[in-house]
Image (spheres, rainbow, N blue to C red):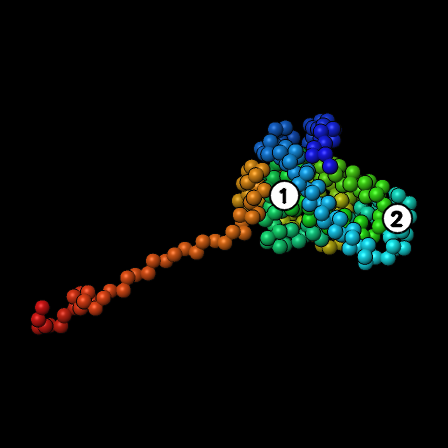
C-alpha cells in the first residue's frame, strides 16, 4: 500500500528514456514533450486512488465468488503449474480488458472518463500513466475479478501484474519494434499507437491490452504495414491539468441550462386601438 514506488519509477526511467532515444518511432519528439509534468502528477497521485478502489471491488468479488463457485473447482485451478496458470490468467484478463475497453468507447458516459487517456497528443512511456482513476479501477477489475473468482494462485496473479505493468508502459512508449508476423498475435507499440491515433480509419480499433489476436478475432484490428500514426489525441475538450481532468467527466454530466426565450409582450386593448389603421373618413 505504498503511495508511490520511487524505485520502480526510477527503473522505468533508466530503461525507457534511453530506449526511446535509441529506437524512436518519432525521432523528432522531445524528451520533455507537451504535458509531461501533468503525466508525472498522474504517476505520483493516481496510485493510491486506484488501489483503494480496486481493493474495495476485489474484496466484494472474492466474497461473492466463494459463495457461488465450488471450492473443489477453485482448488483444481490453483493446483495447476504456475507457468500454465500465468498463461491462462494473461488470456482471461485480456479478454476482460478487451470487452470493457470496447464499452468505454461505445458508451458515452464511460467515454468521458476514457477521453482523458485519449487526450494524449504525444505518446511515450510516461503518457501511459494518464488514465482517469475510475477508468483504471473498472478496467483492472474486469481483468482481475474473473481470475480471482476462478481461484488462480497469488503467484500467477503477481506474475500477471508485473507483465501487465511493463507491457502497458512499452505499448505507449515512443519505441519502434518490428515483431514481424507476431504483430497480429502480441500487442506492440505499433499496434497500440494506432489505437491512440487521430486517423479516422483507426477509430475504435486495437482494443486488446496484450494479445492482438483478440482484435483479429473480433474484427477490430488495424495496422498499416510500414506506416506509423502521425497524429494523436481526440476532439473532446479535455482540459490540460490533472485536477481539471479528474473532474472533467463529472462536469460533462451537469444538466445544460435551457436558454430562455423572451416572448413578445401582449399589447393591451387601448394600445391596439391606438395603433390600428383607421378606415377612410373615420374620426380621430
Residue 246 appearing in the image: yes
Q: Nearer the viewer, residue 174 or 91?
A: 91
Label number found at residue 4: none
Residue 19 appearing in the image: no
* SS class, disc 2: helix
Where's the N terminus, which quadrant?
top right
Where residue 2 appears, as percent x and y from the top left, is: 72, 34
Tell me: 74 left or right of 279: right
Where residue 87 appears, as percent x and y from the top left, is: 84, 46
Q: Nearer the viewer, residue 4 or 224?
A: 4
Residue at point 85% right, 45% down? Answer: 153
Q: Residues within 10 Å of mark 2 (few under 14, many from 20)?
A: some
Residue holding disc 2? 78
Residue at point 50% right, 54% down? Answer: 255
In the rendered image, the vertical position of residue 77 relative to residue 6, given as above or below: below
Q: Nearer the viewer, residue 266 or 1?
A: 1
- Pointer 2 or 1: first along the chain: 2
Residue holding disc 1? 132
Where's the C terminus, which quadrant?
bottom left
Residue at point 82% right, 54% down? Answer: 66
Cα separation between marks 2 and 1: 33 Å
Amino acid at each position: 500500500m505504498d503511495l508511490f514506488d520511487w524505485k520502480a519509477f526510477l527503473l522505468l526511467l533508466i530503461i525507457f528514456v534511453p530506449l526511446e532515444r535509441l529506437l524512436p518511432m518519432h525521432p523528432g519528439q522531445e524528451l520533455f514533450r507537451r504535458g509531461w509534468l501533468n503525466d508525472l502528477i498522474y504517476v505520483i497521485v493516481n496510485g493510491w486512488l486506484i488501489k483503494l478502489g480496486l481493493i474495495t471491488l476485489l474484496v466484494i468479488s472474492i466474497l461473492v465468488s466463494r459463495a457461488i463457485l465450488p471450492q473443489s473447482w477453485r482448488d483444481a485451478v490453483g493446483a495447476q503449474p504456475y507457468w500454465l496458470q500465468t498463461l491462462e490468467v494473461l488470456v482471461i484478463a485480456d479478454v476482460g480488458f478487451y470487452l470493457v475497453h470496447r464499452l468505454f468507447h461505445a458508451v458515452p458516459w464511460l467515454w468521458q472518463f476514457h477521453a482523458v487517456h485519449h487526450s494524449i497528443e504525444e505518446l511515450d512511456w510516461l503518457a501511459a500513466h494518464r488514465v482517469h482513476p475510475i477508468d483504471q479501477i473498472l478496467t483492472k477489475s474486469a481483468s482481475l475479478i474473473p481470475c480471482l473468482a476462478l481461484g488462480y494462485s497469488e503467484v500467477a496473479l503477481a506474475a500477471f501484474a508485473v507483465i501487465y505493468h511493463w507491457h502497458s508502459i512499452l505499448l505507449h512508449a515512443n519505441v519502434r519494434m518490428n515483431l514481424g508476423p507476431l504483430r497480429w498475435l502480441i500487442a506492440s507499440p505499433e499496434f497500440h499507437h494506432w489505437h491512440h491515433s487521430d486517423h479516422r480509419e483507426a477509430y475504435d480499433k486495437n482494443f486488446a491490452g496484450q494479445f492482438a489476436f483478440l482484435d483479429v478475432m473480433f474484427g477490430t484490428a488495424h495496422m498499416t504495414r510500414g506506416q506509423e500514426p502521425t497524429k494523436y489525441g481526440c476532439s473532446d475538450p479535455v482540459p490540460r491539468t490533472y485536477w481539471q481532468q479528474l473532474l472533467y467527466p463529472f462536469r460533462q454530466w451537469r444538466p445544460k441550462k435551457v436558454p430562455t426565450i423572451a416572448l413578445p409582450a401582449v399589447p393591451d386593448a387601448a394600445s391596439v386601438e391606438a395603433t390600428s389603421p383607421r378606415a377612410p373618413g373615420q374620426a380621430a
